[in-house]
């Protein structure tokens, strides 16, 4: 039995942060950091069953192409992904009333639609990146019983060697996304390794008034190459999404619209049409 201090429920029986009941979650889920993006996604549904909001977590569940789909706002950062993934998994794989893990487990398909910054010249603003792997600078998975497999560890060791990653930063980790879901969702997009940063400014090499400890981090990351893989972009959620999904038995994929190209120091004039097309593509491919 899972203690009430571990599996926390609201007075109505919904799970603590998401404020959802199990029947309000579909097995195909689109997550986005921006709360406003959820209404844009659900406006394309054929029908909407429910809308739930608690704090920054907004959930709309409905149907598209005859299949149930949930769109959920996570907010920014791997700390929020930690909440969202654990509570989504509890909703489908725990009996909330009995506080026990179900014998028959459910695997979710989770696609993150986000924005990112590219560090490569060949991936300009207004293009789409699909994350084949994520390197987490956040440290979240170091708190779980998580171990990189042989393939991930081999790439990770090359990353540390080629970039001369310093021990004084957070201990990073590398995790691969779901090959099946990435193949279905990412057709025609730029594949690449994603850096998941634990901040927007110095952790991504930005400088306003404060000097980053590693001011040439993007130059170092840009040089990394391993068996046809290269680091393409920065964002702030994918390493946790991929790591937790792997441990829990879910499939995860991230696709991001490039809004900034850090190589050219340019920013998209208007990325909303690109994002709207990306939402259409993900909905069609997820429900195909």
Image: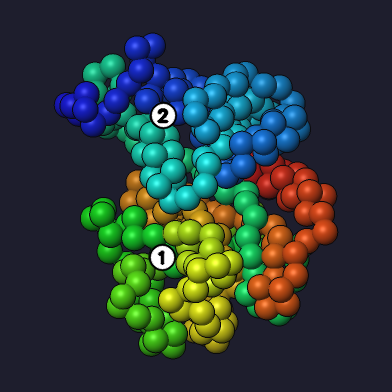
Q: Quadrant of residue 139?
A: bottom left
> Residue at (55%, 22%) from the top-left corner?
52
Figure quadrant of residue 73: top right
Report the residue marked by disc 2. Answer: 17
In front here: 207 or 17? 207
Number of dots carrying numbers:
2
Quadrant of the snapshot with the C terminus: top right
The picture places residue 249, in percent across and down from the top left corner, at 38, 47
Task: Give x and y (percent) for residue 19.
Answer: 44, 23
SS at circle 2: loop
Q: Nearer the viewer, residue 103 or 117?
A: 117
Q: Quadrant of residue 84?
A: top left
Label 2 crowd (10 A; few <14 / some 14-19 / many >=20)? some
Residue at figure coordinates x 39%, y 56% from the top left: 243
Looking at the picture, how far across and down is residue 161, in whole percent? Answer: 38, 87
| Residue 64 seen from this side | no
273 versus 102 height, above or below: below
In this orientation, does residue 286 appear? yes
Which residue does the image show at 49% across and 73% down from the upper left? Answer: 211
x 75%, y 32%: residue: 44
Quadrant location of the N terminus? Answer: top left
Residue on which disc 1 sits: 137
Residue 206 placed where, x, y %?
57, 69
Which numbered marker is on residue 39? Answer: none
């Amino acid at each position: 039995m899972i203690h009430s201090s571990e599996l926390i429920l609201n007075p109505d029986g919904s799970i603590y942060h998401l404020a959802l009941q199990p029947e309000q979650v579909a097995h195909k889920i689109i997550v986005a950091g921006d709360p406003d993006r959820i209404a844009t996604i659900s406006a394309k549904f054929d029908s909407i069953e429910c809308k739930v909001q608690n704090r920054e977590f907004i959930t709309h569940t409905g149907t598209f192409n005859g299949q149930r789909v949930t769109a959920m706002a996570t907010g920014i950062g791997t700390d929020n992904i930690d909440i969202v993934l654990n509570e989504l998994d509890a909703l489908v794989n725990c009996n909330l009333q009995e506080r026990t893990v179900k014998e028959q487990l459910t695997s979710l398909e989770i696609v993150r639609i986000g924005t990112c910054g590219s560090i490569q010249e060949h991936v300009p603003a207004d293009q789409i990146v699909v994350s084949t792997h994520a390197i987490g600078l956040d440290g979240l998975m170091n708190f779980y019983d998580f171990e990189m497999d042989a393939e991930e560890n081999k790439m990770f060791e090359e990353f540390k060697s080629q970039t001369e990653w310093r021990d004084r930063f957070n201990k990073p980790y590398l995790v691969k996304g779901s090959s099946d879901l990435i193949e279905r969702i990412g057709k025609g997009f730029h594949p690449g390794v994603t850096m998941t940063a634990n901040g927007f400014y110095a952790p991504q090499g930005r400088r306003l008034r404060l000097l980053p400890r590693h001011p040439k981090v993007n130059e170092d990351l840009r040089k990394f190459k391993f068996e046809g893989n290269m680091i393409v972009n920065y964002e702030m959620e994918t390493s946790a999404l991929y790591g937790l999904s792997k441990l829990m038995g879910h499939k995860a994929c991230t696709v991001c619209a490039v809004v900034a190209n850090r190589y050219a120091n340019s920013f998209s004039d208007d990325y909303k049409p690109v994002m709207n097309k990306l939402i259409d593509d993900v909905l069609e491919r997820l429900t195909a």
